[in-house]
Image (cartoon, rainbow, N blue to C red):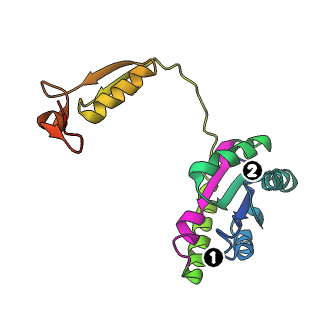
Amino acid sequence: MSTDDEIRIGVFVCRCGINIAGVLDTPNLAEYSAKLPNVAHSTDNISLCTTSGADLIREAVNEHKLNRIVVAACTPKTHQPVFQAVLKDAGLDPSFLEFVNIREQVSFVHMNEKEKAQLKAEELIRAGVARSVFHEIVPEKTFPVEKKALVIGGGIGGMQSALDLANQGYEVYLVEKEATIGGKMAMLDRTFPTDDCSI
């Protein structure tokens, strides 16, 4: 897609069963989104992360010639890769996905303030739509990685990290500023509850 192409945003609001729809009026959020600049298509769905939800997005991309996608749903930490794969299947670069978290950031924390929650969800979606206008393709590159690691700090955490990495086949360099390793633990005589010698 060239930078001269018209920006056509699709907004997809997920009900997430009742996790979102139990607090927010998702059809109303879809109607609100349809009035935002550059939005060519907007809808809500009971569960966007399912096969039928993915089909809905793919069909809308083709039917409405969408080139940016805003998904208003749950946590991007677990679901963003799912929707990036959907975009790729639909012929769009995954960089054109904007994810708006209206579950953890809105419906879960404002379940007793439905009117305020609705306004907050609208603001988050409006911001997501505005941000998606500026999305560009982010090139992906693969680089070879040497199986070496530097662990800074020879306390209990550093030593355990160094051992875990070494057990996975990494060459480990452990750096400690003091003359001995062990950190605070090395200063103790015995540890609770086993009464083991900490050194």
Q: Residue at x 74, y 41 (%)?
A: 88
Residue 23, numbered label: 1
Q: Nearer the viewer, mark 1 or mark 2?
A: 1
Q: Position of residue 103 (x, y in %)?
A: 59, 65
Badge count: 2
Mark 1 Cα shell of 10 Å, populated few (<14), some (14-19), many (≥20): many
Which quadrant: the N terminus?
top right
Residue 103, numbered label: none
Q: Residue at x 64, y 40 (%)?
A: 137
Magenta part of the protein: which range?
A: 94-111
Does the segment drawn in magenta span residue 146? Answer: no
- Amino acid type of disc 2? Asn
Does the segment drawn in magenta span residue 109? Answer: yes
- Amino acid type of disc 1? Val
Q: Does residue 152 appear in this view?
A: yes
| Residue 14 located left or right of residue 106 | right
| Residue 131 located left or right of residue 174 | right
Most foreground residue, 6 or 40 = 40
Kindly indicate the quadrant of the structure image that contains residue 15: bottom right
Q: Position of residue 151 (x, y in %)?
A: 31, 27
Q: Position of residue 138 (x, y in %)?
A: 60, 38
Residue linked to disc 2:
67
Q: Residue at x 74, y 60 (%)?
A: 47
| Residue 91 located left or right of residue 169 | right
